[in-house]
Image: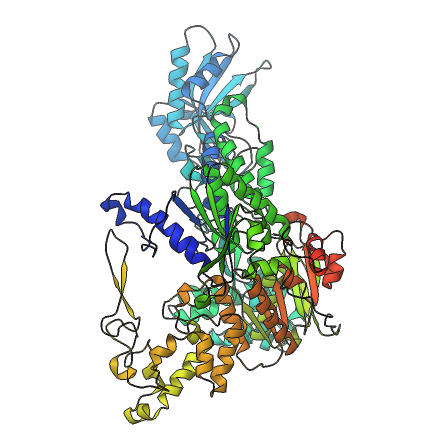
């Protein structure tokens, strides 16, 4: 197990992924035929002279590979494929109307059951045709008489078909045609078999055998040649096969939600945002989506007139029944009671949504809608036929709604009858092993039906890692990108043990990592550096951990041994108890009626083991609630009783690791706004004014100033079919992105293209006389991005770099009002020296009077906080409580807190890994 570490931007990923993995992948692809190669995305050949001893490589990266809501944890890990097979081969069909088990028998089995009756016992073979249905059924009776049948049992009594009088239309009737009447004796086997076969064909697979009892009454025994409920003829299941249990197939998907498990519906909580307003103002937000005679305002006016309600009465003072009528319209009983009909606000909006072709209107209406669990399948994604099949009394959808830990416990206890063991054993053992591996990598709190698009980078990577462990490959080189992201220190040890297991199986594991647990467990460490960007790209030290710790040039070693450290603050900021945002009784996801206090003007850390409810509390409740309060729109916050203190916050800024742009055209200079100022500067030069050039002339995204040969990209893509695509420098502009006339404009001897090729730290010196430009560049330097080129493509930035660019963009702005900055694990991808810079920046934001709320596992960040909210004590159902809220010192002294156990030594100033022996 080799760990590559070093400052952010020092070349770790370039070495691991762009060199080792790329070459291993290239060698494998080159072994394929030319025909096969043209269908693969091929990586360019790495710039390396020679790599010796390279085995086949597999990269497990952070990125979430799919944004499809159909991709779930169960499908990504292939567990769902095994579940589908298990239910198809060992599932028990049940009736979705009455819940009874339904089975099927062959003609031979039904015949044998009849012949097993005592000798001389009389019985009738009947074909059920009608079950408790209204009507005179005259056409049916006429038809069976023409087919040669003589008798029928109608409502429990036997009649000759010739003597049947007209049945009452308004009563429900049951009709069974009598196929044969016999007694059990020798030599009737063939006749019984023929009668059974005829009955099954007449009644579409169902048969009744009425057997005479000792008291001369007949008792019905129900049989079926297919999965059908005798009591509910409309209930029938096709032959069980894996495709029936696929929510991506029309054979299995729920007809209502088409296999998504949710549907979009207008949410009353979003439609009515302030219940204290009078009715005339309650739906003011709707004016943008509904105007004219059919507007919501007109509906409310009609409602007030029809039901005698004053327009100035607050919405919350309406009787509950009238509230329901206003939102959803009148039912039949309402019309009978009030004598008037009203369509309802939500049906009106739903009608607008369906009828409009305007994308802008749909976008506005979308702001009043929420994803709700499908009413037909209750979020199980499958149709009622698939849900009706059970294993151990549980449907496949209910298994997927379990957490991985609960599902593991379910399958550990699952047993089958002896005749099924040979079929189920290999399936169940595969499911058990995959669930065990997922628990080992620390994602046991996730549910199997969790959408793949909602997973964090670290969670997605660990799930793919568990899938790879389950494949039991040998002799493979695995390349991983910070697999400990999102993991608490307690869970990191478990993950490292899993990586060690891969090594013991005979594989090579190369990990790009900053986590001290992973580094101290490595067999070999490569320390890149000494700095970032142009200042990095060298192997500072490599070898055992002791060799790294004894290297004086290693920045990593300096932080590990305590030579350099992030010192705890001298004191914590005190806060005014009246200036807090308080969440009352939050119950979203696994939160257990939590009351959480977020002090304003402080640095707040939310901590806890993986799956304890941190993101639910901060992102799903706090951020969404404040966003809706401030902006009036946005996603619906998770359920809680109320949130107080939100009026004290003027802005909410979320800084996450999503890319700053998905196009190679976006770059740090354009994102933070510095390039706009540079273009304005060039437009003010004497030569540009003489030529009449505006700032738009210096944009590589707009016609006029850019090179039209490459359309401002600087490179041209040449498709090579079965070889990797080649990106060549544009022959017209030589990679500068601009045409010749634009490049003739210079400022202090530099063209606009030269500015884009400058590092941030170089540009900071170059623009020394322009305070606004320097302010934005200084923000980039403060977050540790001085090495990045101003024009560097955003697609080449790591998640951590993208997050810091966003942070710099906020730092460079002039503060307005009280801002709450919300960050989810901002230390992702950061070395300790970068964490040091980041902590300084966050403290700077707080010192300006703002609030910083951070979800974090990094102990150096936690120890710098003014207030810590520690969730737990475990993940999933065993979490969702506030273990302790207080200063880092109070958390460290809490015996129930896992965070406190690891934080205590760090507060005491102990070295991260330990001084060399």
Q: Which residue lies at the image location 48% right of the left edge and 34% below the top edge?
A: 87
Residue at 44 percent across and 79 percent down: it is 763
Eyeballing the image, is 468 above or below 154? Answer: below
Q: Give the camera-side residue of 17 and 437.
A: 17
Query: Please, is residue 716 above or below residue 247 in the view?
Result: below
**Which quarter of the figure has residue 138?**
top left
Please say whether residue 253 is visible from this viewpoint. no
| Residue 742 at x, y percent in the picture | 29, 83
Please tell me which residue is depicted at 60% across the width and 32% down the height of the picture: 413
Q: Position of residue 466 (x, y in %)?
A: 50, 43
> Vertical placement of 787 versus 146: above or below?
below
Query: Residue 378, position in %: x, y?
Result: 54, 48
Way the structure is coloured = rainbow
Q: Nearer the viewer, residue 666 or 286?
A: 666
Question: Could you tell whether 838 is left or right of 79 in the image?
Answer: right
Q: Position of residue 207 (x, y in %)?
A: 45, 25
Quick check: can you spot residue 471? yes
Q: Nearer the viewer, residue 10 or 610?
A: 10
Of residue 197 and residue 594, the one placed in the foreground of this image is: 594
């Amino acid at each position: 197990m080799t760990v590559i570490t070093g400052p952010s931007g020092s070349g770790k990923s370039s070495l691991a992924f762009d060199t080792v993995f790329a070459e291993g992948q290239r060698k494998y692809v080159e072994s394929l035929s030319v025909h096969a190669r043209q269908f693969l995305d091929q990586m360019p050949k790495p710039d390396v002279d020679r790599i010796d001893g390279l085995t086949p490589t597999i990269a497990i990266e952070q990125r979430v590979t799919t944004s499809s809501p159909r991709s779930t944890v169960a499908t990504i890990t292939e567990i769902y494929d095994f579940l589908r097979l298990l239910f198809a081969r060992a599932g028990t069909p049940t009736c979705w109307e009455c819940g009874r088990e339904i089975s099927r028998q062959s003609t031979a089995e039904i015949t044998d059951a009849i012949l097993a009756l005592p000798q001389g016992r009389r019985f009738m073979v009947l074909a059920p045709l009608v079950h408790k249905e209204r009507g005179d059924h005259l056409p049916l009776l006429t038809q069976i008489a023409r087919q040669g049948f003589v008798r029928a049992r109608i409502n429990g009594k036997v009649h000759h078909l010739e003597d049947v009088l007209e049945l009452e239309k308004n009563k429900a009737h049951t009709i069974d045609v009598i196929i044969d009447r016999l007694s059990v004796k020798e030599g009737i086997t063939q006749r019984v078999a023929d009668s059974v076969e005829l009955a099954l064909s007449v009644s579409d697979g169902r048969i009744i055998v009425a057997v005479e009892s000792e008291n001369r009454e007949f008792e019905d025994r129900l049989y079926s040649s297919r999965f059908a409920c005798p009591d509910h003829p409309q209930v029938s299941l096709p032959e069980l096969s894996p495709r029936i249990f696929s929510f991506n197939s029309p054979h299995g998907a729920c007809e209502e939600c088409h296999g998504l498990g949710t549907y979009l519906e207008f949410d009353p909580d979003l439609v009515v945002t302030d219940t204290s307003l009078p009715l005339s103002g309650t739906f003011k937000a709707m004016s943008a989506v509904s105007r004219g005679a059919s507007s919501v305002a007109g509906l409310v006016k009609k409602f007030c007139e029809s039901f005698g309600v004053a327009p100035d009465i607050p919405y919350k003072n309406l009787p509950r029944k009238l509230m329901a009528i206003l939102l959803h319209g009148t039912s039949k009983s309402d019309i009978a009671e009030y004598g008037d009909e009203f369509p309802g606000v939500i049906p009106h909006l739903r009608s607008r949504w369906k009828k409009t072709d305007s994308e802008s209107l749909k976008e506005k209406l979308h702001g009043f809608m929420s994803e709700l669990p499908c009413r037909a399948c209750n979020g199980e994604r499958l149709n009622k036929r698939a849900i009706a099949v059970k294993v151990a009394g549980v449907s496949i959808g209910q298994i997927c709604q379990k957490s991985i830990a609960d599902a593991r416990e379910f399958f550990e206890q699952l047993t089958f009858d002896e005749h099924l063991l040979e079929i189920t054993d290999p399936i169940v053992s595969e499911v058990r092993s995959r669930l065990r591996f997922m628990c080992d990598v620390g994602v046991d709190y996730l549910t199997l039906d969790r959408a793949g698009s909602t997973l964090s980078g670290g969670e997605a990577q660990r799930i793919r890692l568990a899938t790879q462990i389950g494949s039991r490959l040998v002799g493979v080189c695995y390349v991983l990108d910070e697999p400990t992201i999102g993991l608490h220190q307690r869970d990191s040890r478990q993950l490292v043990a899993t990586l060690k297991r891969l090594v013991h199986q005979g594989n090579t594991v190369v990990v790009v990592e900053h986590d001290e647990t992973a580094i101290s467990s490595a067999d070999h460490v490569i320390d890149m550096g000494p700095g970032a960007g142009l200042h990095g790209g060298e192997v500072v030290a490599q070898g055992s951990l002791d060799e790294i710790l004894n290297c004086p040039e290693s920045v990593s070693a300096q932080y590990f041994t305590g030579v350099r450290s992030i010192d705890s603050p001298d004191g914590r900021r005190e806060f005014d108890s009246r200036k807090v945002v308080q969440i009352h009784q939050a119950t979203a996801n696994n939160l257990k009626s939590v009351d959480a206090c977020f002090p304003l003007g402080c640095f707040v850390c939310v901590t806890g083991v993986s799956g304890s409810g941190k993101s639910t509390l901060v992102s799903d409740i706090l951020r969404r609630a404040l966003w809706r309060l401030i902006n009036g729109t946005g996603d619906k916050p998770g359920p809680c009783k109320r949130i107080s203190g939100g009026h004290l916050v003027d802005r909410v800024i979320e800084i996450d690791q999503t890319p700053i742009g998905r196009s190679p055209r976006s770059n740090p200079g354009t994102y933070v706004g510095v390039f706009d100022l540079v273009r304005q500067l060039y437009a003010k030069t004497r030569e540009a004014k003489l030529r009449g050039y505006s700032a738009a002339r210096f944009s590589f995204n707009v016609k006029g100033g850019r090179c039209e040969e490459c359309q401002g990209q600087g490179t041209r893509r040449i498709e090579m079919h079965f070889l990797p695509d080649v990106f060549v420098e544009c022959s017209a502009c030589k990679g500068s992105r601009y045409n010749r006339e634009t490049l003739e404009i210079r400022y202090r001897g530099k063209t606009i293209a030269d500015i884009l090729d400058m590092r941030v730290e170089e540009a900071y010196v170059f623009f020394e006389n322009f305070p606004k430009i320097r302010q934005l560049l200084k923000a980039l330097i403060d977050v540790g991005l001085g090495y990045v080129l101003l024009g560097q493509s955003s697609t080449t930035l790591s998640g951590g770099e993208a997050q810091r660019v966003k942070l710099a963009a906020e730092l460079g702005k002039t503060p307005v009002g009280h801002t709450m900055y919300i960050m989810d694990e901002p230390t992702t991808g950061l070395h300790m020296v970068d964490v040091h810079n980041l902590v300084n920046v966050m403290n700077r934001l707080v010192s300006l009077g703002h609030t910083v709320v951070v979800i974090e596992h990094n102990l150096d960040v936690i120890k710098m906080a003014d207030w810590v909210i520690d969730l737990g004590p475990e993940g999933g159902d065993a979490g969702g409580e506030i273990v302790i809220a207080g200063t880092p010192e109070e958390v460290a002294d809490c015996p129930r807190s896992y965070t406190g156990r690891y934080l205590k030594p760090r507060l005491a100033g102990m070295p991260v890994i330990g001084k060399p022996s």
